Amino acid sequence: MPRGRMSFRLTILGTSSALPTSDRYPTAHVLNVHERLFLIDCGEGTQMQMRRYHIRFGKINHIFISHLHGDHFFGLYPLLSSFNLMGRKTPLHLYAPSPVEELVSRHLSDFDINLGFGLEIHSLASRDLTLILNDKRVEVFSFPLRHRIPTCGFLFREKRAERNIIPEMIGKHCLTIAEIALLKRGEDIIREGGEVVSCEAVTLSPPEPVSYAFCSDTAWFPELSEYVRGVDLLYHEATFGDDNENLALRTAHSTARQAATVARDADVKKLVIGHFSARYKTADILEKEARELFAATEAAREGTSYILG
Amino acid sequence: MPRGRMSFRLTILGTSSALPTSDRYPTAHVLNVHERLFLIDCGEGTQMQMRRYHIRFGKINHIFISHLHGDHFFGLYPLLSSFNLMGRKTPLHLYAPSPVEELVSRHLSDFDINLGFGLEIHSLASRDLTLILNDKRVEVFSFPLRHRIPTCGFLFREKRAERNIIPEMIGKHCLTIAEIALLKRGEDIIREGGEVVSCEAVTLSPPEPVSYAFCSDTAWFPELSEYVRGVDLLYHEATFGDDNENLALRTAHSTARQAATVARDADVKKLVIGHFSARYKTADILEKEARELFAATEAAREGTSYILG
């Protein structure tokens, strides 16, 4: 059975680094996992980009902020304000490095904002690989990046779905609800009298679970590959090209080639690069330099979606 | 002599109220007075709109914020950050109601930002009509509006230029530099021996000075017309239509009809309305209701410029 398309879909809302340009917005990604929408980073103008690309505000219950630099964060307060004005009641979970809790609560008090919904803030320590969200469909981990301030990467791992029952087998074998539940979990049925209904015969394998890792912003370091090993899609910042390798080092950013090194060493399926310095009018040279090491590289563009699985 | 066009030009960057829509950005205006660029309010995404409409960042030395609600303010921190990244050295003047100084300095410290340029913050009291900027070409006044928090309107009055000397008169009358200076100021020359060079004969009148008033956000109150009396262009918020008059009252905003009342009572030349609630898909009904009282009304649109004089 073909995989249900669109069940794990990443949409890029912004590809600029700190200085936005006329066609690049600061970092923000939306990951749709079975209609759970995860917003990852929230630079200025994220809510405008969400409207432009038809992202449903009400479906976002989890926001992940990699670090508290403005180009990853300045869109958060306006978005909270809009959620409030739209009458949101559903609790919102915010994951970000310290001192996010202090900043947000002071902001709400400075601007005298009473949120009509619960805002649960999860302060991240940015050490080790840490499970920070675990629901029926997906696990989310944070892991440490190396930037000028505490910074986290995020890893989204889809959980393996149950097996799919072949509809006509239900009648053929007179399967009960209880039997169907067992078969979907991969067990065979042995009925009284010895009749066997084999799981293999009446169900189909679910699609392989997919995974996405988000790395922004970071200097290159060898252990990074371990955190993102084997993911289907790796997003990695590539602020600079070879021509600015020293500047990358000095500002704790990566070159496109370093991003490709991580992708290659981690044996990922596909690499998307972004967070381009405004000095590059197009990302062509960055894409080219990365592809020399890792062919399955693509330069991110605003509004592009990647469907995995 | 025809007025030098484009010497007093208002560009609208945003027309939404608190909730931006897919085609409306929050409030921001740029007023160009003889190549001095004044940014008035700075909602989220203002710097993107500036890029979209080719506003030169380096020409902005003065920013005026009417009040500290997010939809008039959230674009300021990202803009300061961009100025800094672009290597700005020129001092920047920021005019806004208290406690702007406290908020901005705390923000810079929270985000560990060292500005490479001087930021001079002018805290406004939002009482009476007050001269807050006075240069060779323009005077800027703040005046009180009535909103839920301290809020200022701004009045920009071009100064009367000197008279224009008719070029061929310089040779004809062998005018000296000192004489030209006197003539441009409107004085006649009486030379030794009694020869008179009449100002009227060798110079032309300068264009009439023009003026712009910005009123956002405010409930209607009768004294407002006095502050903006006779301006060439009045911008007045019109968040609601007649259908939401009570909501306007409750939220200390104006209806389009109330904006038109101010324009009519103040005898202004033209009214531009904006700050439209997201409930109005188009501003047509608001424009229509305002025009019933004041025909020279136009609903603002992103990117529209008004050239005065």
Image: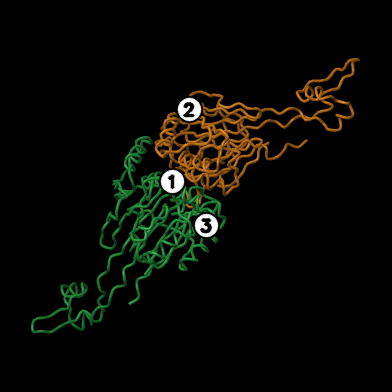
Chain colours: A orange, B green
Q: CA distance from mark 1 to mark 2?
A: 27 Å
Mark 3 residue element: helix
x, y (%) of residue A220?
A: 48, 32
x, y (%) of residue A259?
A: 52, 36
Q: Tell whether A112 sits left or right of A305.
A: left
Amino acid type, mark 2:
Ser
The reply to whether callout 2 and callout 3 are in contact (CB within 8 Å) is no
Mark 1 residue element: loop
The nearer-to-camera label among 1 and 2 is 2
> Circle 3: is it few (<14), some (14-19), or many (20+) Cα within 10 Å?
some
Q: CA distance from mark 1 to mark 3?
A: 42 Å
Residue bearing the label numbered 1: A19
Sequence-wise, the earlier of marks 1 and 2 is: 1
The nearer-to-camera label among 1 and 3 is 3
Label 1 is found on which chain of the structure?
A
Label 3 is found on which chain of the structure?
B
> In terms of image quadrants, where is residue B149?
top left
> In terms of image quadrants, where is residue A202?
top right
The residue at the point 88 percent across, 30 percent down is A171
Q: Is residue A241 visible?
A: no
Residue bearing the label numbered 2: A123
> In terms of image quadrants, where is residue B112?
top left
Amino acid type, mark 1:
Leu
x, y (%) of residue B53?
A: 45, 58
Q: Foreground: A47 or B247?
A: B247
The residue at the point 33 percent across, 42 percent down is B99
Quadrant (top left/top right/bottom left/bottom right) for the N terminus of chain A: top right
